[in-house]
Image: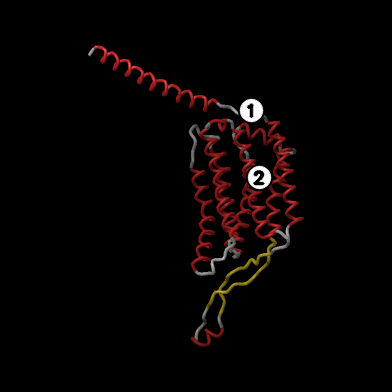
Amino acid sequence: MQKRQARACVILRIRRYRKCATVISMKKLFSNLKKTKSKITYKSLNNWNKTMAALHALQGVLVLVLARDVSFPISTSYLTLDPLASQANGQPALVDATRNIFDINLAYLVAAFFFMSAIAHVLVATVYRSTYEANLKRGLNKARWYEYSISASTMMVAIAILSGVYDFSSLIMIFMLVAIMNGMGLMMEIHNQTTKKTDWTSFIIGIKSGIVPWIVIGLYFWGANTYGSGQIPTFVYWIYGSLFVFFNCFAINMYLQYKKIGKWADYLYGERVYMILSLVAKSALAWQVFFGALRP
């Protein structure tokens, strides 16, 4: 009996020791994760900006050189008087009408967001460098959000056109909603310069405004399959899915920055991730469009 009790006591101690060791090891793991620091310098970031400028510019040129001309009709809808219906009813009858106002070359649109990014990277690597680096020390990059508000909005317009959104007014709204989303990213960084605790209001507003264009395009897919022939090219669905994931990665990167998780505790690490995401997202969209619709 005494042997059994002694054995049970030893087993209990071993279990407690293992449990204690596990808790300690987990604490060490999270402690090390929080202490993890990246080795990114302002000089290396400057080289990154120069490299990114070259890669964006090169791809923009390749698109213009290799792509065939594919134009989409951009239209506007309006109310107009229907003479026949008015005469038949004995009173003015208004009907909706659509008119093509201009055509847009898809290759130019794709090349445009590459050149926007290239110009932004050149500026922050040269004439804007001192201001850029001073802002980075404060956890702020105005140039990034200004560029995204134009380039990302242009990307979204390209996706919308490929999905069948040809109405000029709708495209303007899609452009502006994405621009507002990125404006909220800028507001997030500016506002939290003055707060002790991170305020997520701008982040939440940005997500809400940014999700609307994706819902609108999804409704066009639904309409094409429900009321039309449903023959939207497969590559357009791939673009929709892949770019939706990439756009969300930008929000995740910001979240990790403000939560200071792992290497994201260093703002410069998140800045470099933004550069990589921007290049990959634009490249993924451009070459999916190229091989789906622009290849000769």
* Position of 129 relative to 206 (above/below): above
* Position of 237 relative to 119 (above/below): below
**Looking at the picture, how far across and down is residue 172, in whole percent?**
60, 59
CB under 8 Å between discs 2 and 1: no
Number of numbered discs on residues: 2
Which of the marked residues, 2 or 1, is nearer the chain's N terminus? 1
Q: CA distance from mark 2 to mark 1?
A: 21 Å
Please tell me which residue lies in front, 75 or 146: 75
Query: Which colour scheme appears in the figure?
Result: secondary structure
Residue at 54% over, 30% down: 262
**Looking at the picture, how far across and down is residue 201, in whole percent?**
48, 43
**2 left or right of 29 in image:** left
Tag of residue 170: none
Which kind of residue does numbered mark 1 sit on?
Lys
For disc 2, the marked residue is 279
**Looking at the picture, how far across and down is residue 67, in whole percent?**
73, 58
Q: Quadrant of residue 184?
A: top right
- Most extreme residue toward the left, as rendered? 1
Residue at 68% over, 51% down: 113
**Looking at the picture, how far across and down is residue 59, in whole percent?**
72, 49
Which kind of residue does numbered mark 2 sit on?
Leu
> On the rendered image, what quadrant is the C terminus found in?
bottom right
For disc 1, the marked residue is 39
> On the rendered image, what quadrant is the N terminus found in?
top left
* Position of 108 relative to 195 (above/below): below
Residue at 52% over, 27% down: 33
**65 left or right of 76 in image:** right
Residue at 51% over, 80% down: 93
**285 left or right of 206 in image:** right
Mark 2 secondary-structure assignment: helix
